[in-house]
Amino acid sequence: MAGRMLLGAFWCLMLVLVLVPCYAYKYKTYFMTQRVDHFSFANDDTFLQRFLINDEHWDKNGGPIFFYAGNEGDITLFAENTGFMWDIAPEFKAMIVFGEHRYYGISEPYGNRSLTVPKYSGYLTSEQALEDYVALLSYLRFVIEGAQTSPVIVFGGSYGGMLAAWFRIKYPHIVQGAIAASAPVRQFTDFTPCDKFGQKVTEDFANASASCAEVIRKSWGAINSITANDEGLAWLSKTWKLCKPLKSTADVDTLKAYLMDVWTNLAMVDYPYPANFLAPLPAYPVKVVCSHLTDSSHDGKALLEELFAGLTVYFNYTGESKCLDAGQQADVRLDDQGWDFQDFFEPAPWDFQAYTANCQKTWGVTPRTYMVPLMYGGWSFKAASNIVFSNGLLDPWSTGGVLWNVSESVVSVIIPEGAHHLDLRSANPADPLSVVEARRLEKAHITKWIQEFKQLQGAA
Ligand SMILES: *[C@@H]1O[C@H](CO)[C@@H](O)[C@H](O)[C@H]1NC(C)=O
Ligand SMILES: *[C@@H]1O[C@H](CO)[C@@H](O)[C@H](O)[C@H]1NC(C)=O
Ligand SMILES: *[C@@H]1O[C@H](CO)[C@@H](O)[C@H](O)[C@H]1NC(C)=O
Ligand SMILES: *[C@@H]1O[C@H](CO)[C@@H](O)[C@H](O)[C@H]1NC(C)=O
């Protein structure tokens, strides 16, 4: 493994030296015509769903298909950041397929109208997305010579991990097993108290240093008091190099929402090596941010200047940022405009009415509190089979995950030093042992699922 990685690094270096961009993973891009509405006969509209394939290691005689259930973003981003599948495809002689989730990337059912009104946006649901994946895999098994008897293992991280688990739960005749990484399948009303998530983010920063968490805690009050007058609004806009100067309390609310996203994202992607998932960041970015937030005795302007030094790590690690754009999403790389719409699955009981009002205002729809558990389960998962739920304990989303072994075939893998789906990333020399062990367990389960499938076929 180490030898292969060195060799890979060598070739990358060679490519860089001859000034060719170094793409780690190669795939072909295809499109499939999908129904916009899989569940009624009232709408015959179709759209093109993008998917990516690599079959260079595939055993054309029934070798497995490793399928990534795309989540809220451009599918090429997930292809780049799910190295685990690429790492293990050769030994399993697997074909790799990445399916783009409808309404994200370039798989937009109604072009630039897709997210305008419920008539167009209403088909953005996990059920419709899963049915796209069913149609896609069934089609591939039908048209690709040798794939008719291929077992399918579904992978996913985060919301994609939820899709992976739900895929196996709902369609055990289509997929033989699921690796559901950092899947908050219990992050719903009555399953997980909603303050756990924020507590976990806080714990990550507090563990880096007590003063770090304290500086962030004090910053909200400092922002409120300093921006209470025009002079303060102008001062903060200038000191934080904001792209758009603050003019109103609404602008300040936007800035605070951006900051909440930044701290949350940092906790999620607190990886042990530099990575570029939600943003380009150094190794252990929480520690690096906290190395700037060391003096919690500061107040007011001094505190906010200190905070900005930490913030710079997030928005300007490359040194190329001209200004701080608090109006944009903190995770610019995902481009997940539709995510807020989907997020209505995740009711916020601290003020469900306000949440509902916001959904109605933004999307023209009303969230349903118990929709997800009624549709997919969530109480025990004892009726399910062949799922590995993995969770890193640095990850705030682990608070809504399955953290115990459910049965022989629905198992939970805990990665104490892991952030958000670290196990799905490619092997790295800086990996903690716990993630190496997690991947070993996942591979053992995949092997078992494939063997079971082959045995059933032999018996038929
Ligand atoms: C949407 O796309 C159509 C066709 O490509 C174009 O004519 C129109 O200007 C676009 N509208 C917006 C709001 O971008
Ligand atoms: C980003 O970093 C570069 C290099 O340190 C610096 O010149 C630039 O001013 C920074 N941008 C912002 C908005 O702080
Ligand atoms: C924070 O530190 C405490 C005490 O060492 C430890 O029990 C806990 O797991 C740590 N939490 C995180 C998220 O690292
Ligand atoms: C689940 O069982 C496996 C062994 O079968 C074990 O390695 C793992 O630690 C268990 N997970 C939990 C959360 O107890």
Image: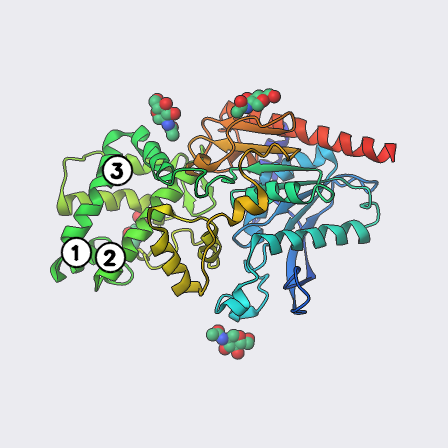
**Residue at image point 19% right, 50% down:** 223
**Contact? badges 3 and 1 (CB < 8 Å):** no
Q: Secondary structure at mark 1?
A: loop
Q: Secondary structure at mark 3?
A: loop
Residue at numbered disc 2: 252
Query: CB at mark 3 closer than 8 A to ligand 2?
Result: no
**Contact? badges 2 and 3 (CB < 8 Å):** no
Q: Position of residue 352 (x, y in %)?
A: 37, 51
Three-letter amino acid code at the position of disc 3: His
Three-letter amino acid code at the position of disc 1: Thr
N-term mark: 2 or 3:
2
**Contact? badges 1 and 2 (CB < 8 Å):** yes
Image quadrant of ligand 4 equals top right
Q: Is residue 113 visible?
A: yes
Q: CA distance from mark 1 to mark 2?
A: 8 Å
Residue mark closest to the camera, 3 vs 1:
1
N-term mark: 1 or 2:
1
Residue at numbered disc 3: 292
Quarter-of-image position of residue 241: bottom left
Q: Is residue 31 above or below residue 449?
A: below
Residue 386 lies left or right of residue 430; in this view the side is right
Three-letter amino acid code at the position of disc 2: Val
Residue 7 lies left or right of residue 159; in this view the side is right
**The C terminus, quarter of image:** top right
Residue at numbered disc 1: 227
N-term mark: 3 or 1:
1
Q: Residues within 10 Å of mark 1 (few under 14, many from 20)?
A: many
Residue mark closest to the camera, 2 vs 3:
2
Q: Position of residue 7 (x, y in %)?
A: 62, 34
Q: CA distance from mark 3 to mark 1?
A: 23 Å
